[in-house]
Image (cartoon, rainbow, N blue to C red):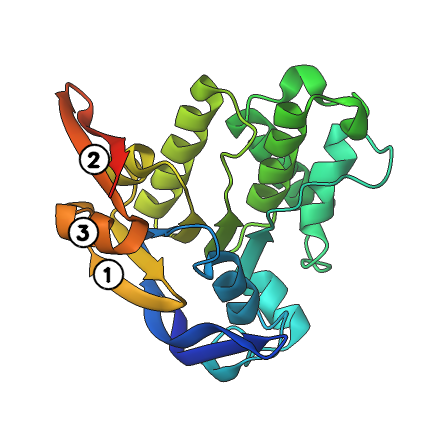
Amino acid sequence: MSLLSLSRLSVTRRRRPVLRDVSLDVAAGEFVGLIGPNGAGKSTLMEAALGLIPCEGRSSLADLSAAERARHAAYLPQSREIAWPVSVEVLIALGRIPWPGASNAQDRAAVDAAISRMGLEPFRHRTANRLSGGEQARGLIARVLAQETPLLIADEPIAGLDPAHQLSCLSLLRDLATEGRGVLVSVHDLGMAARFCSRLVLLSGGAVLADGTPDEVLSDDNLARGFGIRVQRIETPEGTAIVPAAPL
């Protein structure tokens, strides 16, 4: 079942084309990684898909009302500022706003589950904007989890996390896809993308350069064309590690 459908999506900002005729679907059970160099249009694609910025073409999400969209897709933007001095528990509970008909017990269960999955129990009553950057990022990811939507869209969710929490975060997102949700994330670490994502979409110059399995998308030719780099591949017990070796 498709949870997101984009058809010929194009975005122009300050008279400069940022995205050109991007079409893709994200289905339930998929963990899709958006990769590409800086300025390729990854964040813009997510914002346009959610109806947050003007665009040409069609997004199935943008067609929904704001209330319907909030119950269908949870969004973690790249900007992670926490503006108010609320507790971590209250921050995460904000993810329940799209569900005004839920019971207190349902809201509590969703918040508790999100806190548990992100390992935030010791921080539950701490003031969120006084935590470290990585701890704040985990709290915001937990807020997205508490929203309990079939589709989760996250712009660089592992940015600012230490290596252990990067691994646990991507493992969690993969588990959510295995459980039947659709997950779309942007990620810069090609090795992490190869290890955790079931499918990759490579953007370059505002267009889709490649779309397929990690092995298909992360070919030497695609990486040379998309990133202008040569990579080294190292086989490990956890899978192939991809290390940028040199620019072309």
Q: Vertically, is 233 above or below 144?
A: above
Residue at the extreme right: 85
Q: Which residue shows up at 87% across the image and 33% down it?
A: 85
Question: Residue 183 in the image: x percent, y percent?
Answer: 40, 51
Give the number of the mark in front: 2 or 1: 2
Q: How far apart are marks 2 and 1 (CA)?
A: 19 Å
For label 3, the SS is loop
Q: In this view, does 176 lie to the left or right of 244?
A: right
On the image, numbered disc 1 is attached to which residue? 211
In front here: 14 or 155?
14
For label 2, the SS is strand
In front here: 167 or 78?
78
Task: Give the quarter of the image for residue 69.
Answer: bottom right
Q: Which residue shows up at 43% across the image and 49% down it?
A: 185
Q: Distance between the residues labelled 3 and 1?
A: 7 Å
First along the sequence among labels 3 and 2: 3
First along the sequence among labels 2 and 1: 1
For label 1, the SS is strand
Q: Which residue shows up at 46% across the image and 79% down it?
A: 10
Q: Vertically, is 188 above or below 14?
A: above
Asked if one can make out residue 172 in the rendered structure from this viewpoint, the answer is yes
On the image, numbered disc 3 is attached to which residue? 213
Amino acid residing under circle 2:
Val
Question: Residue 232 in the image: x percent, y percent?
Answer: 17, 30
Of the numbered discs in the image, which one, if any, rests on residue 231?
2
